[in-house]
Image (spheres, rainbow, N blue to C red):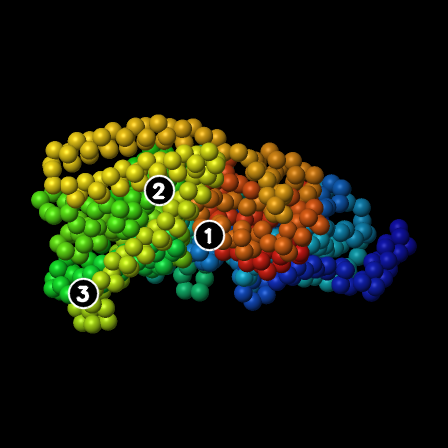
C-alpha cells in the first residue's frame, strides 16, 4: 500500500512539474474579455464536501457585460458545466451589478472591469484516491463597447482528489466579489402592488443610499413589460416604484451603498425578509402610501427626462415631415414684419397653443389607452390606422391648394382672406391651426432625445406623461415664441411685398411632397389600388375646392349657399364611396429580388425558430413604412450592394417584420427586446445556440457589415 501511495504521489508531482498552468486555470478570451475558472476547493478535496467554483470575466476598459436581468438591452452571461461523472453544480449566482446608461438613454444592469459568476460544486461521496479531476465549463457572454460582440469560450481548472499524503498543490482563489447576502434584511420592507407598479418602502440605515435591480426573469415573459425604477427619499426613508406589468412574480435585488462598501439582499412578494406595510414606522408608511405616483421619481431623473423631451421637441422642427409647415410659419413672420410687436407676440402664442393642444391631447389619449391595457407607442398607434393617414393626406392636399390660390378661407364676420393673411392680419385662429397642423405631421418622427424621453414617460404615471408631452410641446414651440418676443430681430426679416404671393405658392410644393410620402405610406398599408382611389378622392376634393374658390367672387348669397350645399353633397358622397373601399383594400405581397434588392422573408416567430433550429444565420429588420428612420436605414445601410452580396454569398436569411399595420407578433417581438417601437434590427449568427446581436437604431453600412462578417 505504501508503494502504491508513493507511486500516486510521484505521478501527481510529475503532472505538477509538466503543466502547472493546466492544474490551475485554463483561461479563454473574446473581444474585450478574458475569462477563467477558479475554485476555493481545499487541497486535497474531501469526498462529498461542496466547494465554490467561480467564473471570472476580466473586461478591458470601456467594455461591459450584463447581469442576469440585463435591463433595456443586452444578454446575461451563460455557463454550461462539463463535470466528471457524479459531480453536481448548483444554481449560478451573479455578483452584485451596477447600473449604466447606453445610447438612447437605455438603462442596463451589468459589470465593468470584472464580472463574477459562481456555483456550488459537489463531488460524489465515493471518490478514488490519487486522482486529478478536470472541471470544465463553456461560458458565453455579450460584451459591449461601441459595438456589442458575443463571445464564447471553454475554460477549465483542476482539483486534487483525496490522497494519503501532503501535497503543496497550487491554488488560484477567486476574487473577493460582492454577493447577495444569505440572511434576512436588517430592516423590514413593505412591498405592495399599485396598478401596474410595485411600491417598495422601508427605513434604511443612516447615511446609506439604496438601489433596486428588478429580476422578472430572462427572457421577459411575453405578457410582461418592465419600466425604469424610480424612487423618492427623505432622510432614511425610501420609497421605490418599479413599473411591472404582467404575470412574472416580483423579485428584485436591493443594494445598500454605505461609505465604500456595498451589501445586497434578495426581496420578493413571498420572501421572508419582507413584511406588511403595517410593520413599518409611520414616516415610512406615509412615504410609501401617500406620495403620488408623480413624486416617486427623483428630481434629478425627472428634470433630465423632461429636458430630453424639450430638446427632442426642438429638433422636431428640423425633421422633413415638419419642415413644410415650419416654412409657412416663417412666411407668417415675414407677413407680420410691419405689425405691432404685441400682435406678433400674440400670433406666436396662438401658434404655440396649437402645438400644446395637440401634444396634450396625445398625452390624454396615451393615458386612456394605457388604462385600458393597450400597448402604446410613439407614432405607431396613429399611423398604423389607415383612416388617420387618409384624413391627414386630405388635410395636407387642401392646405396646398389654399397656398396655390385655388380657394380662400372665409371666417365668419370677416372678408374673405387667404390662410396666410388670416394668420397675419388678426386671424389668431389661423396661427393656432398652423401649430396644430405642424404637430400632426410631427407624430411619425422620432428625433434624437425624443424616443428615449417618451419611452421613459410611457412607463410612468399620468402626471409624468402629461408633463413630458408638455415639455416636448414647449421645445417645439420655443423657437417661435422666442422670435415673436424679440421685436429687434424684425430688422432681419424682409419687408412684405408682391414677391410674397409667389413665395406662398412655392411653399405649396413641399406640402405636395409630403402628400407623396403619405400616399406611399397608404400604398404600403393597403396596396396600389387604395392609393389610386385616394388620388380619385383628391380629384373630387380639388374640384370642390376650385368651385368654392370661384364662389367667393359671387355677390349673390343665394347662389353661394346653394352651390356650397351641392359641393358638400358631392364631397360627402365621394368620401362615403371611396374611403370604405380604401380601408377594405388588401395589399399585394411583393419581393424585391426581381429588381435586384433583398428577397425578404416575412417575419413570423415560427419561421424564425425553424431557421434557427437549422443553424442558419438570420437578419431580422423590424420596420414600418411611416418610420423615416427605418427607411433611411434600409436605403443607406441594409439594402445596399455590399450587404446584398454578403447575404447572398453567405446564406443569410433576410427577414422583415413589417409593422406598418398593427401586428401582435411583431409587437411581442419588440417587447422581448425591451423596445416599444421601430426601428429594430437583430442579427442571429449561425448556430442553434447563438445569441442575437441587437444593432444600433441608426445604422451604417460599415457597422452592419462588421457584425455580419465577424459572426
178 left or right of 137?
left
Q: What numbered label is drawn on residue 432?
A: none
Of the numbered discs 1 and 2, the one sitting upstream in the chain is: 2
558 or 592: nearer the viewer: 558
Residue that carries the numbered disc 3 in the rendered image:
337
The label shown at residue 393 is 2
Residue in the image at 74% along x and 55% along y: 158
Quadrant housing residue 193: top left
Q: Give the percent coordinates (x, y) of residue 547.
A: 24, 39
In this rendering, would 490 be left or right of 682? Answer: left
* Badge 3 density bin: few <14, some 14–19, many ≥20, Cα 10 Å: many
User: Residue 425, position in %: x, y?
Assistant: 14, 56
Pick out the residue farthest to the left: 413
Residue drawn at (50%, 34%), measured in percent from left and top? 587
Label 2, residues with CA under 10 Å away: few <14, some 14-19, many ≥20: many
Q: Secondary structure at mark 3?
A: loop
Mark 1 or 2: in front is 2
- The residue carrying mark 1 is 629
Q: Position of residue 449 (x, y in %)?
A: 39, 57
**One can see residue 284 in this view:** no
Labels 3 and 2 touching (C-beta < 8 A): no
Question: Residue 41 location, x and y as percent?
Answer: 67, 54
Image point (49%, 53%), residue name = 632
Q: Nearer the viewer, mark 1 or mark 3?
A: 3
Under tag 1, what secondary structure?
Answer: helix
- Disc 1 crowd, CA 10 A, few/some/many (<14, 14-19, 20+): many
Amino acid at each position: 500500500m505504501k508503494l502504491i501511495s508513493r507511486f500516486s504521489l510521484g505521478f501527481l508531482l510529475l503532472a505538477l512539474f509538466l503543466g502547472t498552468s493546466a492544474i490551475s486555470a485554463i483561461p479563454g478570451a473574446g473581444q474585450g474579455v478574458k475569462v477563467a475558472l477558479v475554485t476555493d476547493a481545499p487541497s486535497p478535496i474531501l469526498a462529498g464536501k461542496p466547494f465554490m467554483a467561480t467564473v471570472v470575466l476580466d473586461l478591458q476598459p470601456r467594455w461591459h457585460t450584463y447581469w442576469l436581468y440585463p435591463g433595456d438591452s443586452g444578454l446575461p452571461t451563460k455557463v454550461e458545466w462539463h463535470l466528471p461523472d457524479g459531480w453536481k453544480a448548483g444554481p449560478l449566482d451573479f455578483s452584485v451589478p451596477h447600473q449604466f446608461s447606453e445610447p438612447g438613454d437605455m438603462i442596463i444592469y451589468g459589470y465593468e472591469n470584472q464580472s463574477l459568476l459562481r456555483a456550488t460544486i459537489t463531488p460524489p461521496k465515493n471518490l478514488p484516491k490519487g486522482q486529478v479531476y478536470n472541471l470544465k465549463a463553456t461560458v458565453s457572454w455579450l460584451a459591449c463597447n461601441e459595438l456589442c460582440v458575443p463571445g464564447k469560450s471553454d475554460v477549465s481548472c483542476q482539483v486534487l482528489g483525496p490522497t494519503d499524503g501532503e501535497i503543496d498543490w497550487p491554488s488560484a482563489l477567486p476574487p473577493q466579489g460582492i454577493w447577495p447576502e444569505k440572511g434576512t434584511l436588517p430592516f423590514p420592507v413593505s412591498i405592495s402592488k399599485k396598478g401596474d407598479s410595485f411600491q417598495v418602502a422601508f427605513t434604511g440605515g443612516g447615511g446609506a443610499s439604496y438601489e433596486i435591480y428588478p429580476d422578472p426573469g430572462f427572457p421577459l415573459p411575453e405578457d410582461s413589460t418592465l419600466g425604469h425604477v424610480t424612487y423618492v427619499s427623505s432622510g432614511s426613508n425610501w420609497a421605490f416604484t418599479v413599473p411591472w406589468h404582467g404575470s412574472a412574480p416580483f423579485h428584485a435585488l436591493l443594494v445598500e451603498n454605505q461609505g465604500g462598501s456595498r451589501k445586497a439582499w434578495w426581496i420578493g412578494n413571498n420572501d421572508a425578509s419582507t413584511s406588511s406595510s403595517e410593520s413599518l414606522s409611520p414616516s415610512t408608511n406615509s412615504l410609501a402610501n401617500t406620495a403620488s405616483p408623480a413624486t416617486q421619481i427623483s428630481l434629478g431623473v425627472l428634470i433630465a427626462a423632461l429636458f430630453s423631451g424639450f430638446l427632442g421637441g426642438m429638433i422636431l422642427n428640423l425633421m422633413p415631415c415638419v419642415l413644410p409647415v415650419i416654412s409657412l410659419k416663417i412666411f407668417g413672420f415675414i407677413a407680420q414684419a410691419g405689425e405691432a410687436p404685441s400682435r406678433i407676440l400674440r400670433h406666436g402664442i396662438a401658434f404655440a397653443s396649437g402645438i400644446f393642444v395637440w401634444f396634450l391631447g396625445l398625452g390624454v389619449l396615451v393615458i386612456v389607452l394605457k388604462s385600458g391595457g393597450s400597448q402604446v407607442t410613439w407614432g405607431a398607434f396613429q399611423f398604423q390606422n389607415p383612416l388617420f393617414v387618409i384624413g391627414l393626406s386630405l388635410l395636407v392636399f387642401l392646405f396646398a391648394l389654399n397656398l396655390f390660390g385655388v380657394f380662400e378661407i372665409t371666417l365668419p364676420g370677416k372678408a374673405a382672406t387667404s390662410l396666410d393673411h388670416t394668420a397675419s392680419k388678426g386671424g389668431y385662429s389661423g396661427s393656432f391651426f398652423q401649430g396644430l397642423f405642424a404637430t400632426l405631421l410631427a407624430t411619425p418622427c422620432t428625433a434624437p432625445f425624443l424616443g428615449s424621453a417618451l419611452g421613459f414617460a410611457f412607463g410612468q404615471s399620468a402626471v409624468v406623461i402629461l408633463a413630458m408631452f408638455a415639455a416636448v410641446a414647449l421645445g417645439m414651440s420655443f423657437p417661435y415664441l422666442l422670435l415673436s418676443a424679440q421685436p429687434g430681430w424684425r430688422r432681419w426679416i424682409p419687408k412684405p411685398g408682391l414677391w410674397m404671393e409667389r413665395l406662398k405658392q412655392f411653399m405649396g410644393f413641399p406640402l405636395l411632397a409630403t402628400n407623396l410620402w403619405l400616399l406611399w405610406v397608404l400604398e404600403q398599408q393597403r396596396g396600389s389600388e387604395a392609393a389610386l382611389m385616394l388620388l380619385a378622392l383628391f380629384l373630387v376634393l380639388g374640384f370642390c375646392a376650385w368651385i368654392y374658390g370661384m364662389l367667393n367672387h359671387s355677390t349673390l348669397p343665394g347662389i353661394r349657399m346653394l352651390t356650397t350645399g351641392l359641393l358638400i353633397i358631392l364631397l360627402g358622397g365621394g368620401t362615403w364611396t371611396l374611403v370604405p373601399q380604401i380601408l377594405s383594400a388588401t395589399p399585394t405581397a411583393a419581393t424585391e429580388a426581381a429588381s435586384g434588392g433583398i428577397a425578404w422573408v416575412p417575419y413570423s416567430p415560427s419561421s424564425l425558430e425553424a431557421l434557427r433550429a437549422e443553424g442558419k444565420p438570420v437578419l431580422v429588420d423590424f420596420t414600418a413604412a411611416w418610420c423615416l428612420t427605418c427607411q433611411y436605414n434600409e436605403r443607406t445601410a441594409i439594402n445596399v450592394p455590399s450587404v446584398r452580396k454578403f447575404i447572398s454569398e453567405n446564406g443569410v436569411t433576410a427577414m422583415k417584420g413589417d409593422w406598418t399595420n398593427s401586428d401582435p407578433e411583431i409587437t411581442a417581438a419588440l417587447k422581448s427586446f425591451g423596445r416599444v417601437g421601430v426601428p429594430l434590427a437583430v442579427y442571429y449568427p449561425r448556430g442553434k445556440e447563438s445569441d442575437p446581436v441587437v444593432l444600433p437604431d441608426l445604422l451604417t453600412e460599415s457597422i452592419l457589415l462588421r457584425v455580419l462578417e465577424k459572426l
